Image (cartoon, rainbow, N blue to C red):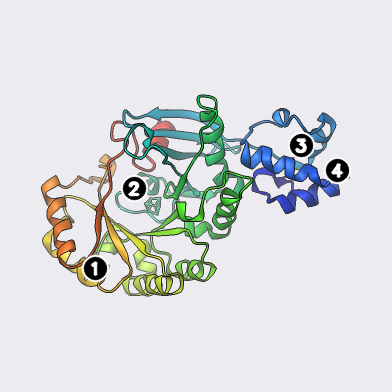
Amino acid sequence: MKRLELRALAEEELTEVAIGLGLKRFRAGQLFQWVQGKAVQTWDEMKNIPAQERLQLAESLNFHPLERVREQRSQDGTRKYLFRLHDGETIECVLMDYERRHARDRRTVCVSTQVGCAVGCAFCATGLGGFRRNLSVGEIVGQVLDIVCHLRREDPEFNITNVVFMGMGEPLLNYDNLLQAIALLNHPKGQNIGMRRMTISTSGVAPKIRDLARANPQVGLAVSLHAASDELRDALVPMNRRYPLKELLGACREYSELTSRRITFEVALTEDTATRAHAEELAALLKGQLGHVNLIPVNPVAEAGIKRPLKSELKTFAELLEGNGITVTVREERGTDIDAACGQLRRQWEGES
Ligand code: SF4
């Protein structure tokens, strides 16, 4: 029989396991709290569960904390982690720790959902390495749990307030595992992270955006738009060849109608795309859509020949959108002194090993 993954199980599922092993029902609640709430990494730490019962549970359940193989710290408080999974694959995860700066109560983790990525966006180092596999529920949740465990050794009160599914991989291509992971992270006896404090970022998997609209888990949605014409978007975000702008925007409209939630449209600007014509095209495309635009000056990726726009070009682009009634934010640059662009740390590490 296939062993279940400890970190993927809800309390009700743990209850079934406990009863199946002849243990008391309340052990499941204790187990859930140790794993999802206290974020322990070993069976031995679960002190209120007798050693014999821990042994029985360990024989029935897989418990694979992630191995932290590399950590980079930025001067701005950002920490980037490279985790090794039990099968030797590696993933990246970023903690954006705002404590040192303006928002003292906000600690956001950028979580990966796949090993590698099949989408192949032009400015992304993850896409360059291709797709390996989906992450399991326990591996998605585990990124948050292992960061919590690691940092509680420095500060016992440490917790994570926000999660963005914006790391390696296309989250909506691992839809079922993603939604299960979100439910676990939201659980009051777990990390208790509010639904509205979690955001899914997609390259534009239109049918899954419609599914998400119907499921309406109250999480935020960010769409990596990046271009206002199919011609340009086909080149930057190859997902567009499957779900062109008309289909994507149709799904976004349905999402807004069903959920009444604003979508964040991410637009990464390079020196080639930060133009007046592009801004005007984008304003026309998003007219009447509930949402706002988040402009991102790209992190340069040397292998892909991508260059960042000038600050003045970025400012003009934002002003043109605002002039057309579109709300605009500019993403704060974080971790520029470390390899913070998605996939760069993993590629560097794989190149060395
Ligand atoms: S940006 Fe996201 S969707 Fe695009 S290749 Fe990178 S990981 Fe995949």
Give the answer, above or below, for where 215 lies relative to 188: below
Asked if the beta carbon under badge 3 is closer than 8 A to the nearest atom of ligand 1, the reply is no
Q: Which amino acid does label 4 sit on?
A: Leu
Q: Which of marks 3 and 2 is nearer the N terminus?
A: 3
Crowding around mark 4 (Cα neighbors within 10 Å: few <14, some 14 to 19, many 20+) is some
Q: Name the residue under label 3.
A: 58
Q: What percent of the width, then of the height, locates residue 322?
A: 18, 62
**In this rendering, would 33 be left or right of 316?**
right
Q: Name the residue under label 2.
A: 124
Q: Earlier in the sequence, mark 1 or mark 2?
A: 2
Q: Which amino acid does label 2 sit on?
A: Cys
**Picture quarter containing residue 236?**
bottom left
Q: What percent of the width, then of the height, locates residue 13?
A: 74, 52
Please tell me which residue lies in front, 128 or 268: 268
Asked if the beta carbon under badge 4 is closer than 8 A to the nearest atom of ligand 1, the reply is no
Q: Earlier in the sequence, mark 4 or mark 2?
A: 4
